Image (spheres, rainbow, N blue to C red):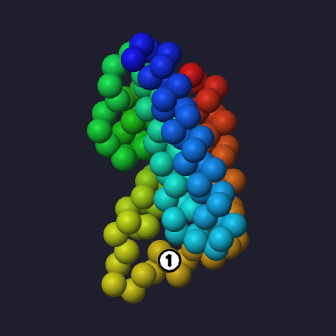
């Protein structure tokens, strides 16, 4: 694949995950809606990485690490948000014995965080 094809691959995959996040939200599967929100941001960061360096992006799910590797300037608020979104990946996939993350994922909590993810999504698309 050439550079443009690689970038488009990551963007298309991110868009597909964003659609899945919406479906999961509609069905009330809030933890996994946030998990797919994380995947959306991760893949867009990887698209930005490819657009900047034309290299294979790092194999990591840590969003702040990817943003730092790219050289994105992060406000403290954006950095904190990327750390929170990274936690959605871990907490949805590896719940504790009390399923505390699943209990925290109310409709309102999930809706609020999906809105924040959408803001990050739009911001990242501006960097491609």
Q: Is residue 76 left or right of residue 27?
A: left
Q: Specify the quadrant of the image occupied by residue 127.
A: top right
**Farthest left residue?**
59
Q: Going by the image, does 56 lie left or right of 12?
A: left
**58 or 26: nearer the eye?**
26
The residue that appears at 32% across and 43% down in the rendered structure is 60
Residue at position x 48%, y 48% from top?
A: 39
Residue at 64% x, 26% y is 126
Asked if residue 27 can be seen in this view, the reply is: yes
Going by the picture, which residue comes out furthest to the bottom?
98
Q: Is residue 96 left or right of residue 17?
A: left
* Label 1: which secondary element: helix
Q: Position of residue 120 (x, y in %)?
A: 61, 42
Q: Which residue is mark 1?
A: 102
Q: Quadrant of the C terminus?
A: top right
Q: Position of residue 113 (x, y in %)?
A: 63, 59
Relative to 46, say whether 84 is above or below.
Answer: below
Residue 115, percent from left and from top:
69, 53
At a point 67% along the width and 43% down the height, the residue shown is 119
């Amino acid at each position: 694949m050439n550079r443009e094809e690689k970038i488009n691959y990551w963007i298309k995959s991110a868009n597909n995950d964003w659609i899945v996040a919406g479906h999961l939200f509609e069905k009330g599967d809030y933890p996994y809606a946030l998990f797919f929100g994380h995947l959306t941001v991760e893949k867009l960061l990887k698209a930005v990485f490819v657009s900047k360096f034309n290299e294979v992006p790092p194999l990591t799910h840590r969003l702040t690490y990817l943003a730092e590797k790219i050289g994105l300037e992060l406000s403290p608020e954006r950095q904190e948000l990327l750390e929170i979104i990274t936690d959605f990946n871990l907490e949805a996939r590896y719940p504790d014995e009390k399923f505390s993350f699943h209990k925290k994922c109310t409709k309102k909590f999930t809706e609020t965080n999906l809105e924040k993810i959408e803001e990050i999504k739009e911001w990242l698309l501006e960097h491609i």
